[in-house]
Amino acid sequence: MTDDGQRITDDVGLCRTCRWARIVTNRRGSTFFRCGRAETDARFPRYPPLPVLRCVGYEQRRVDET
Ligand code: SF4
């Protein structure tokens, strides 16, 4: 769940638990996953097509990270 209570499903894939993922919600309430690695590495799309099933940049988010 996001802070505003929206459900995030496994349709997202790896980005859901990746420390580089940034959750973006637009004015219509749609949620997108932005890849933080895209800011410094051109191999990663800013908004990866979901679900992401394999990714060389994946790093699992630690429990103390938000
Ligand atoms: S590094 Fe890969 S898994 Fe992590 S947010 Fe970017 S695209 Fe998603």
Image (cartoon, rainbow, N blue to C red):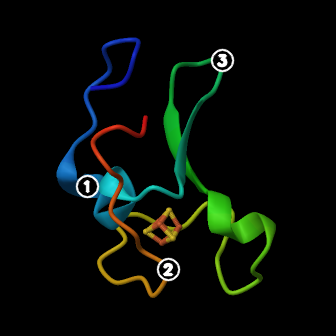
Residue at the disc numbered 3: 27
Gap between marks 2 and 3 measured at Cα: 29 Å
Tell me where residue 8 sits by quadrant.
top left
* Amino acid of disc 3: Arg
At which x and y percent is residue 37? Answer: 65, 68
Q: Secondary structure at mark 1?
A: helix
Q: Are marks 3 and 1 in contact (CB under 8 Å)?
A: no
At which x and y percent is residue 23? Answer: 52, 38
At which x and y percent is residue 38? Answer: 71, 69
* Amino acid of disc 1: Asp
Q: Are marks 2 and 3 in contact (CB under 8 Å)?
A: no
Q: Secondary structure at mark 2?
A: loop
* Amino acid of disc 2: Gly
Residue at the disc numbered 1: 11
Viewed as shown, does residue 55 lie left or right of 1? Answer: right
Q: Sequence-wise, which precedes: disc 2 or disc 3?
A: 3
- Which circle, 2 or 3, is nearer the viewer? 2
Residue at the disc numbered 2: 57
Task: Indicate if the residue with disc 2 has its beta carbon within 8 Å of ligand 1.
Answer: yes
Gap between marks 3 and 1 measured at Cα: 21 Å
